[in-house]
Image: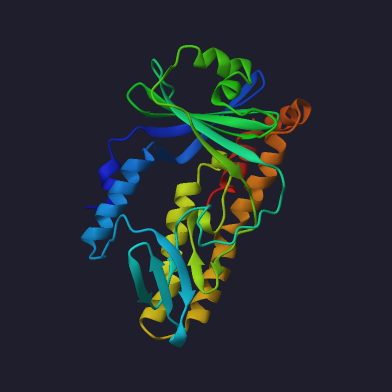
């Protein structure tokens, strides 16, 4: 079973609404997105992996990956160690396998929760304010996901975020929270790092893109596939690991790096003071400009 077929009935999201102060614009999402809970996607990917013949070990934390003689790796886990010809780190932005050096001292906080809302909009709604933003999207039935990224000095709780703009505050007054707020901190941004000590890095382990771009999961899947394609020659013994790392680095830079740069620039405008945000809203209200901006923050 293909993973995409498992989610054919999930809510389709054909548009996004951007709220800046009292103004709002609607942008098309083409092709339309699907609203899929992360735990359901992870389970479907795990099932597809097993069906493809991959040996999966669960409940086994990877503690360290070391280079070994002969160009191999030793993977040390909580239950033992084993050898591997290649290694890919897909353990996220705070993986203990990654030496993470943020390029900015600005501290961002992520907060999220699910809420029950009567008749949710079929769009992804983005509420921007000085120092952060909050995204609201339907996840099926009468439930929405509200997730925010804010500077630490701007807000420290989801309640403060929901009160950050009059529009979001009025909307959230009718919400019923379904589970305690989840918080993650700190969030930092840096230039993508595609490998470290011979280990390929994919998804957030390589780089963290702004959540408002809506492309984090897509980038993880695309970069994972690119890593596999780059390593295929090593498995077939047609070229070296060093060549595979070079190919992955160059292809990653060509396909994905522009999205990170453009998302960073757009974040600076969208979370700036009101007079700057209002000027940007005027530009985004033009369909051709909006399509150009959205396209430049997506993986290709």
Residue 74 in the image: above or below residue 123:
below
Colour theme? rainbow
Q: Quadrant of residue 293?
A: top right
Residue at screen point 48% across, 38% down: 29
Query: Is residue 241 at least partly visible in the picture?
Result: yes
Residue 108: percent from left, percent from top = 63, 39
Residue 183: percent from left, percent from top = 52, 35
Residue at screen point 45% across, 28% down: 113
Closer to the camera in the image, 53 or 20: 53
Query: Is residue 122 at least partly visible in the picture?
Result: no
Residue 44: percent from left, percent from top = 28, 48
Q: Quadrant of residue 258?
A: bottom right
Is 234 on the left or on the right of 186, as rendered? left
Residue at screen point 58% across, 44% down: 210
Closer to the camera in the image, 255 or 169: 169
Residue 131: percent from left, percent from top = 69, 32
């Amino acid at each position: 079973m293909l993973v995409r077929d498992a989610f054919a009935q999930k809510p389709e999201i054909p548009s996004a609404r951007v709220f800046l102060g009292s103004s709002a614009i609607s942008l098309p999402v083409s092709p339309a997105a699907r609203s899929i809970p992360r735990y359901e996607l992870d389970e479907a990917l795990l099932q597809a992996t097993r069906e493809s013949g991959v040996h999966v070990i669960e409940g086994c934390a990877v503690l360290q990956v070391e280079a070994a003689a002969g160009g191999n790796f030793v993977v040390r886990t909580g239950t033992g160690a084993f050898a591997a010809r290649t290694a890919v780190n897909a353990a996220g932005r705070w993986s203990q396998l990654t030496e993470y050096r943020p390029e900015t001292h600005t501290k961002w906080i992520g907060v999220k929760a699910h809420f029950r809302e009567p008749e949710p909009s079929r769009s992804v709604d983005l509420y921007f304010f000085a120092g952060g933003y909050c995204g609201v999207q339907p996840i099926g039935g009468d439930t929405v996901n509200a997730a925010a990224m804010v500077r630490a000095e701007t807000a420290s709780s989801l309640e403060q975020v929901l009160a950050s703009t009059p529009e979001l505050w009025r909307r959230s007054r009718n919400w019923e929270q379904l589970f305690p707020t989840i918080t993650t901190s700190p969030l930092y941004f840096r230039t993508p790092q595609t490998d470290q000590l011979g280990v390929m890095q994919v998804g957030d382990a390589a780089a963290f893109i702004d959540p408002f771009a809506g492309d984090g999961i897509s980038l993880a899947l695309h970069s994972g596939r690119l890593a596999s394609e780059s390593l295929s020659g090593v498995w077939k013994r047609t070229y070296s690991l060093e060549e595979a790392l070079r190919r992955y680095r160059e292809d990653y830079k060509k396909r994905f790096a522009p999205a990170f740069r453009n998302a960073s620039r757009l974040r600076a405008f969208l979370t700036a003071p009101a007079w700057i945000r209002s000027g940007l809203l005027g530009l985004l209200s033009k369909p051709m400009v909006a399509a150009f901006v959205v396209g430049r923050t997506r993986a290709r």
